Amino acid sequence: MNIIVCIKQVPDVTEVTWDPETGSLIRKGIPSIINPNDKNAIEAALQLKERHGGEVTIISMGPSQVEEALREALGMGADRAVQLTAKQFAGSDTWATAYTLGLAVKKIRQYDLIICGKEAIDGMTAQVGPQLAEYLDIPQLTYATHIEIADTRVRVKQKLGDFNRLLEASMPALITIEREAYQPRVAPMDTILEAYGKEIPVWGPEDLSGEEDNFGLMGSPTRLRKVYTPKLKKGKVEILDGGPEEVARKLVEKLKEKYII
């Protein structure tokens, strides 16, 4: 079984700040980590590999320092990694990101499953996984807390609020993993050392054979117009006295005065 895991390197959100002019994250000088949800996805892939055999490939798009995240994933036990780095990829929204990842998946060709974290902590859109599945025209099984493989089909337990349901699809398919599922292992020292001896190919637009207008900011149909901290306004509180019916009548009158009802 060949499994591809898409991961993202994100800034430590306890220290993140925004550029008020551009609305983008200020990453300079801020330590980066593998998106926590994506580490769960790596763990899910490794456990499936241990049960069914095969290979785990990690893909990540980002600046040159994303190599650190890929090395960490290799240290956890992944077999190989691919880095997508180019100035043309900068400023990608979720769709442009899914497009670029999709081209990389097509270049790899042979895969049975793609596993992603449910969402990234720096955006929390939960869109890249589903958009990637749509681009590749494969089934998507989202919010998974457990995965089972039987022959050429995959079954997941999906979390929906206070409820769970079972979903099944033919492979290849894409799965997004819930944060509480598949707690990541601690990488042993020997695999960490091996990870730093592995070659990680770096692919740019010329390697992916995509349309350059679809990459990065140019290929992003959404734009972030403004980022700001809402101002808290303090208002005057009025306590209405009387019994329930009288209080209700007074409240209705007040709301009418304000043209709320």
Image: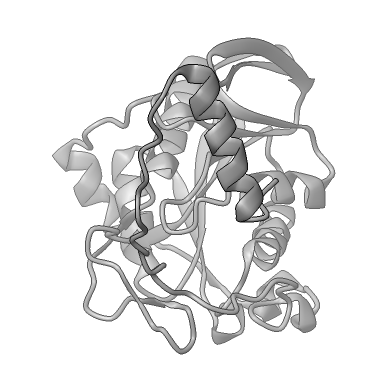
Relative side of 122 to 254, left or right: left
Instruction: Please identify the quarter of the rendering in which residue 90 is found.
Output: bottom right
Q: In which quarter of the image is the N terminus?
A: top right
Residue 83 horizontal/vertical position (percent): 49, 65
Instruction: Please identify the quarter of the rendering in which residue 112 is found.
Output: top right
Residue 68 horizontal/vertical position (percent): 31, 62
Residue 160 horizontal/vertical position (percent): 60, 21
| In the depicted structure, whether residue 2 falls above or below residue 228 | above
Rendered residue at 71%/16% (across/down)? 167
Q: Quadrant of the C terminus?
A: top right
In this view, the residue in front, 173 or 200, is 173
Relative side of 23 to 43, left or right: right
| In the depicted structure, whether residue 78 falls above or below residue 12 | above
Rendered residue at 21%/78% (across/down)? 29
Rendered residue at 60%/77% (across/down)? 204
Residue 199 horizontal/vertical position (percent): 40, 62
